[in-house]
Amino acid sequence: MRELGRRSEAASHPYKAATPAPRISVPAAKPLEHAPLALIDKVGRREEVVAACDGARALGVHPGMAATHARALVSDLDFRPAEPEADAALLDRLALLAVRRWSPIAAVSPTDGLWIDLAGCEHLHGGEERFCRRLLAFCRRAGFTARIAVADTPGAAHALARFGRGDLIRAEPGATASALAPLPIVALRLAPNALSAARRFGFETVADLLPVARGPLARRLGLPAITRLDQALGAVAEPITPREDAEVPLVERRLLEPIGTAEAIEQVMGDLLRDLAGVLQERGLGARALRLTGLRVDGTEQVVALGTSRPTREVPHLVRLLKLKIERIDPGMGLEQFWLVAPHTEPLDAVDLGAVLAGETLVRDPARLVDVIAGRIGPRAVFRVAPVESHVPERAVARSDPNETPGPWPKWPRPIRLFARPEPLARVMALMPDQPPRRFEWRGKTYKIVAGDGPERVHGEWWRREAEVWAVRDYYRVEDEAGGRYWVFRRGDGFEDDTGDLSWWMHGVFG
C-alpha cells in the first residue's frame, strides 16, 4: 500500500453507451419575424394572459396563465395590455365588410369571431368550400390566423370553429349531432356554473349529454344549458341579427292599420320601390338584390328576397319581380310595418341609346326575361351554354351567365341534345374497324340503322390523367328507319387493346 500510494482514475459512466450515439438531423426552426408577444388583461383580481402568438405558445405561454408566471417562464417575452374595445371595433368593421361583400346576414360572434349566413348566396361565390378557401386566403393576406366551420346551425358552427380539428371544417347537412359529439362541453357556450356542475357529474363531451333525458339534465345543469344544446342541434332557433349598414339604401313604411290582402301588400311594395328608386338615383346606383321585411302585429317578421341579373332601379320591373314573392308572405293577423333594403348595389350610369333610337342597331337585353324566369324557377335553373376549348365533347361546353353572349362555336357537327354522361348500347352489330353500327339496342328499344357517317376520332386529353394517354373514341352520325339521327361512339380503334374495350355508347340526339 505504501508503494502503490493513493491513486484515483476516472471511471466510465455505467449508463454511457459504448458506441457513439447516431446523429439526428433536426431542421432549424423558422426564425420569428418578431419577439414572442402576449396580451395581458385584468381578470378578477389578477392579471392573466388573454392572447398569445405562436412563438409564445411554443415557449409554454398560453391564455389563462397568470402574468407573473408567464414573466418568470420567459424573461424576454413582449407583454402588452389588451384592448378589448379596439378588438370589438375591428370585429365590427369585419362584420360590415362581410355584409357588403359576402352575405346580407353577418354579425359579430363574441368575442373573437364572425357569423356569416350563406343560405341562398353560396352560389354567388362558387359554393361553400370555394368561398371558405377564399375567406381563409383573405384572412392570411390581412395578417389573421383564422379557422372556418360550416354547419346547419350557428351554435354548431361556433363550436366546430373553436374546438374542431383543422382550419376548414364542414359538417354535412343533417349530421350536426355526429359532428358535435366528440367536442368538449365548453364548446356549447355554457355558463361557468353549468361547466362546474357538468364536471361534477362526469360530463366531458357533447356525446355524454346527447343520450341523457332533458328533464334530469336540466335539473343538473340548468335550463340555459339545455337551450344552448338545443340551439346547436337545431331544435331551438337561434336567429342571427345582421350588422346594419348605414350606407345600405333603406326605405321604411309604417301603416296606420295592419294589412293582410295581396292587393294591399302589392300597393305597399310599389310605394317602397318608388322611394328606393329615388335613393338609388341620388347615389348613382342600381339594385342587384332586394330584401323586403314585413313586421306582423304579433312581433314576428316575414322576409322575402330577390336578385337581379344586372343593376337596375326600374320600378315596374322590380314590382313585377316582388309580386312573384307575395304568396310566400304569411300576414297572420296583419302587417303593420315594412322595410325594403338593397344589400347589394352596383354603379348604374346613363345608357347611350343614340344608335338604338336612330335605328342603326338593335339591342335585345335578356336581363328582364332572365329575372322573371329566375324568380319562378330559381337562379340556378337559368343559364347559357358557352363553348370551352376541349376536344372531348362533354368537356367542350360549360354553363355561363345568361346575359353574356357566348364566344364562337367550332364548326364541328354536334347534336342538339348532348347527354351529360354517355349511355351504353347493347347488342350492337357493326363491321370492324371503321364502319358505323347497323343495329343496336338503347333504353330497351331496338334501332335499325339505314345510314351512317364517320368515324370522327377523338383522343383523350393525356395531360389530365394517365387513363387518357391512349384513349380513343370513334364517333358516328347514324339515322334509323324512323328518321331519328343519333350520335354514337365506340371506345377503341379496333387494333390496340389499350385504346378501349370496343364498347358502344350513345352520346347525343340530333333532332
Image (cartoon, helix red, strand yellow):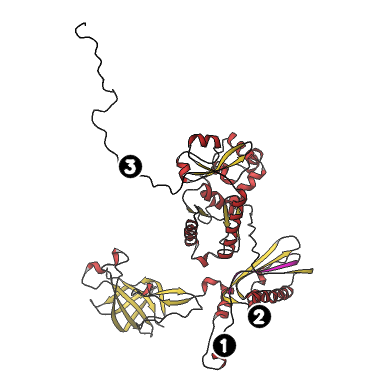
Q: Residues within 10 Å of mark 2 (few under 14, many from 20)?
A: few
Q: Which residue is mark 1?
A: 353
Where is residue 52 drawn, in percent x and y?
51, 44
Residue closest to the eye, 267 or 487: 267
Precedes in sequence: disc 3 or disc 1? 3
**Mark 2 belongs to which amino acid?**
Pro
Q: Cα distance, mark 3 to mark 1?
A: 71 Å
Nearer to us of marks 3 and 1 is: 3
Nearer to us of marks 3 and 2 is: 3
Q: Which residue is mark 3?
A: 26
Precedes in sequence: disc 2 or disc 1? 2
Q: Which residues are magenta?
A: 331-350
Q: Can residue 210 be seen from the camera position used here?
A: no
Q: Main secondary structure of the magenta part?
A: strand
Residue closest to the eye, 402 or 208: 402
Secondary structure type for disc 3 = loop
Q: Is residue 444 magenta?
A: no
Q: Cα distance, mark 3 to mark 2?
A: 71 Å
Position of 148 relative to 77 (above/below): below
Q: Which residue is mark 2?
A: 316
The number of numbered badges drawn on the structure is: 3
Q: Residue furthest top?
A: 2
Where is residue 181 drawn, in percent x and y?
52, 46
Residue closest to the eye, 502 or 345: 345
**Mark 3 belongs to which amino acid?**
Val
Q: Is residue 334 magenta?
A: yes
